[in-house]
Each structure stands twice: as structure tokens, then as C-alpha cells.
Image: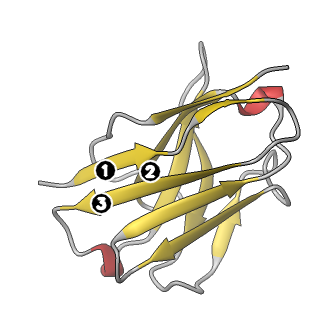
Amino acid sequence: QVQFVESGGGLVQPGESLRLSCATSGFRFEIYTMGWYRQAPGKQRELVAGIGIRENDNTNYANSVKGRFTISRDNAKNELYLQMNNLKDDDTAVYYCNQGRFAPTASWGQGTQVTVAS
């Protein structure tokens, strides 16, 4: 079955960086657009970034992360990444990956917690 295993989260200070990874299995990764989503405490899950099916394909970002986050993928490894720079307190959330660059289309993994605090 479709599986997502997110990793790379942690506790960082404002202005620092993290790189999230998502290992996928159970589907043909190279024919699906992919996205990163996040859910902050008390808020709905939201789209953070999306990417087309190719490694250098079009990307899309939430306004709040444009210029700070970069999504990428490695189709040979079936993995999705999110480079997060200049992290802010508002970026604190559980981060998830999923099929779909604009909206999720599969069940969720366990996510990875990102906490930004001074």
C-alpha cells in the first residue's frame, strides 16, 4: 500500500534551517506530482509546496514560505525533500508529504515535527 515516511524535523531557533525527507513506497513515485503539507496546533492542514512529476519540474509554494523553502524530488530514490531556510516561529507544525502538488490524494503518514523557538 501507499506509504510515506517523513523525517528530518526537530527543534531549531528562528533563522535556522532544516531539510525534511520523505521516503515513499507502494506506488510509482515518478508518475505522481507530490506535495508537502503541514498542520500547526489548532489549525487545519495546509499546502506548503508542490512539485510536478519530473525532478526539475514546476513548483508551487504557499505565500508564507516563498523564497525560504525549496521542494525537490529524486525519482531514482522515490524520495521527496523540503529545504527550509530562515525558519520562523509560524513554521512550527507537523509536516507531511503526500501525492498531489495542489491537494493531497492519499492517506497520511506519521509526519515529522518541526518546532521553531528561541
Disc 2 versus disc 3: nearer the observer? 3
Q: Is residue 109 left or right of residue 62?
A: left
CA gap, disc 3 to disc 1? 5 Å
Callout 2 amino acid: Cys
Q: Is residue 67 left or right of residue 48?
A: right
Q: Residue at x 56, y 26 (%)?
A: 44
On the question of residue 29 being in view, the answer is yes
The numbered mark at residue 24 is 3
Task: Give the class, few, some or many, for how many residues have Cα within 10 Å of label 2's Cα (few <14, many ≥20).
Answer: many
Quarter occupied by residue 30 = bottom left
CA gap, disc 1 to disc 2? 7 Å
According to the picture, the residue beneath numbered tag 2 turns out to be 97
Label 1 residue SS: strand
Callout 3 amino acid: Thr
Q: Is residue 39 left or right of residue 69?
A: left
CA gap, disc 2 to disc 3? 9 Å
Q: Are marks 3 and 1 in contact (CB under 8 Å)?
A: yes
Q: Are marks 2 and 3 in contact (CB under 8 Å)?
A: yes
The numbered mark at residue 78 is none
